[in-house]
Image: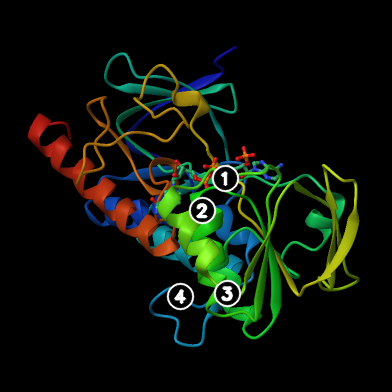
Amino acid sequence: METKASEKVHCLIIGSGPAGYTAAIYAARANLKPVLYQGIQPGGQLTITTEVENYPGYPEGIQGPEMMVDFEKQAARMGADIRFGLATKVDFSATPHKVWIDDEKLIEADAVIIATGASAKWLGLESEQRLNGYGVSACAVCDGFFFRGKEVAIVGAGDTAAEEALYLSKLCTNVHMLIRRDEMRASKVMQERVFKSPNIKVYWNTDTLEIIGGKNVESVKVKNNKTGEEQIIPVSGFFVAIGHQPNSDIFKGWIDMDEAGYLKTIPGTSKTNVEGVFASGDVQDKIYRQAVTAAGSGCMAALDAERWLGEKGIH
Ligand code: NDP
């Protein structure tokens, strides 16, 4: 890697979802002169959702991409320096911390706020991509409401799938739960709740072949991988709940993480194991994963960074 240029900044924020922009708003107002790099998906996961109805302050709801434009505008108005670029490598062995952007530009930062988010895993079907946002979703809490009184399918068998199936079962007439093996990975208590729900139908040993629909999802074609039997289930919504991947690869070896790659923070704070490096949003949260909780933790990270810089007398 050839470093073409370098720059020293006081507070560097990596990521542009609700956590990153909220951290930028707070850091800018605290005069930390934050520089924020947006990554490959400016706005983060919300830019691939449609309507957001559960973020307080938008009584009529708002489109996810539009909301993220509002976040960005607010951060910019407060004075955050928002830039396009992807953090590709870090060296947290000493302060100032080193972060490389697009493999070429070196940023040296007194404090770093990581807000790189997580990405939903997808099955990888062409129809899943084509109908994404038109009945295909990776977030029942975000999009379940649009399927009130309708039939939906959900694929996955972990705690998230179980939780989301239960959530959907309260809104939808029937939830068809597609499980690829003959058992579920979810905790026993979650499994029992699923089995006790009269309107959740579990399909064991079942693979999804295709999601069918022109403009919107109309049905799903599945196959029993033991018997080979195929069937078409009419549904209006298709939820994918097969796990998330935290965007934490570049921090391996520097920041403590769990076996799935979620960054570890000291409970009740955004502090990581490296002094002056803070983590917020979905990259450190595998439980809640909501825009509002990410924004809240971005605020925490900015306040923790401000306090840390003050304690160290770094101006
Ligand atoms: P998990 O990795 O635990 O589960 C993913 C599920 O998706 C597995 O059942 C897996 O099947 C299935 N899957 C993966 N790929 C495919 C595929 N291509 N086709 C069909 N099915 C597939 O992810 P979760 O998001 O459920 O959970 C992540 C972590 O967060 C876990 O540790 C979980 O316990 C935790 N969590 C805790 C909650 C709570 O405590 N309330 C709530 C939500 C999550 P297979 O089993 O065959 O591998």
Residue 218: x and y in percent read 84, 73
Residue on which disc 4 sits: 54
Measured in 3D between alpha carbons, the distance from the residue under mark 3 to the one under mark 4, in whole angstroms, is 27 Å
Camera-side residue of 176 and 13: 176
Q: Secondary structure at mark 1?
A: loop
Residue on which disc 2 sits: 160
Measured in 3D between alpha carbons, the distance from the residue under mark 1 to the one under mark 3, in whole angstroms, is 25 Å
Amino acid type, residue under disc 2 in the picture: Thr
Residue name at image x 36 percent, y 52 percent: 24
Q: Secondary structure at mark 4?
A: loop
Q: Secondary structure at mark 2?
A: helix
Measured in 3D between alpha carbons, the distance from the residue under mark 2 to the one under mark 1, in whole angstroms, is 7 Å
Amino acid type, residue under disc 1 in the picture: Gly
Residue on which disc 1 sits: 243
Camera-side residue of 103 and 247: 247
Eye-nearest disc, 1 or 3: 3
